[in-house]
Amino acid sequence: MNKHWKPLAAVAAVISILAAVFGGLYNSLNSARLDVDAKWSQVENVMQRRHDLIPNLTNAVKGSMKHEEKVFSAIADARKAYASASDANGKLAADQKLGEQTSILVNAIHENYPTLSSNQNIKALMT
């Protein structure tokens, strides 16, 4: 009877060893899959945050562009008014308006315009 149990015990031992190896392999693969899912979730979070910030960036750029557009269009309008003025009073008024608008532009440049807070916000959003 002892002879019959030895081969069965050997087969049971081999099956147990194989089950332990495959069980460990399954657990490590499952752990790796969960790790990949967690890392991908982080990537999706970053992409979603970036997607959510794009409207803020476009609105900030639009606001900055509106300010610049106002200054440059006012200068262009003052130049047109000066060019179209026919008498001295009209030229004087147009020149005064042109002077006011260019002083706004010069002050903005003199105050180091690119470092204004709205542009800093735009740079932060772009980053």
Image (cartoon, helix red, strand yellow):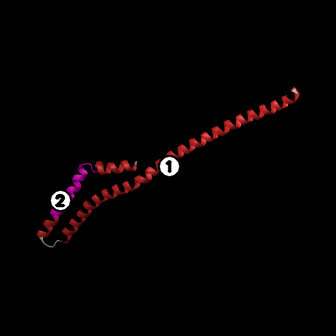
In contact (CB < 8 Å): disc 2 and disc 1:
no
Q: Decide: is 40 above or below 18.
A: below
Q: Secondary structure at mark 2?
A: helix
Which residue has dot 2 on it?
100
Q: Decide: is 109 above or below 88.
A: above
Query: How would you rate the neighbour count of disc 1 (Cα within 10 Å): few for under 14, some for 14-19, many for 20 or more?
Result: few
Q: Position of residue 82 (x, y in %)?
A: 19, 68
Mark found first going from the N terminus, 2 or 1: 1
Q: Which span of residues is magenta-colored?
A: 95-113
**Distance between the alpha carbons at the discs numbered 2 and 1:** 51 Å
Residue 44 is tagged as 1
Residue 61 position by quadrant: bottom left
Residue sitting at x 27%, y 58%? 67
Residue farthest to the top, as pictured: 2
Residue farthest to the left, as pictured: 89
Residue sitting at x 32%, y 48%? 120
Q: Position of residue 86 (x, y in %)?
A: 15, 73
Residue sitting at x 23%, y 66%? 77
Residue sitting at x 57%, y 43%? 36
Q: Position of residue 113 (x, y in %)?
A: 27, 51
Of residues 43 and 17, the one drawn nearer to the viewer in this rendering: 17
Q: Position of residue 88 (x, y in %)?
A: 11, 69
Residue 78 is tagged as none
Is 107 on the left-hand or right-hand side of 25? left
Is 67 on the left-hand or right-hand side of 2? left
Residue 100 within the magenta-colored segment of the rendering: yes
Of residues 116 and 24, the one drawn nearer to the viewer in this rendering: 24
Is 53 on the left-hand or right-hand side of 75? right
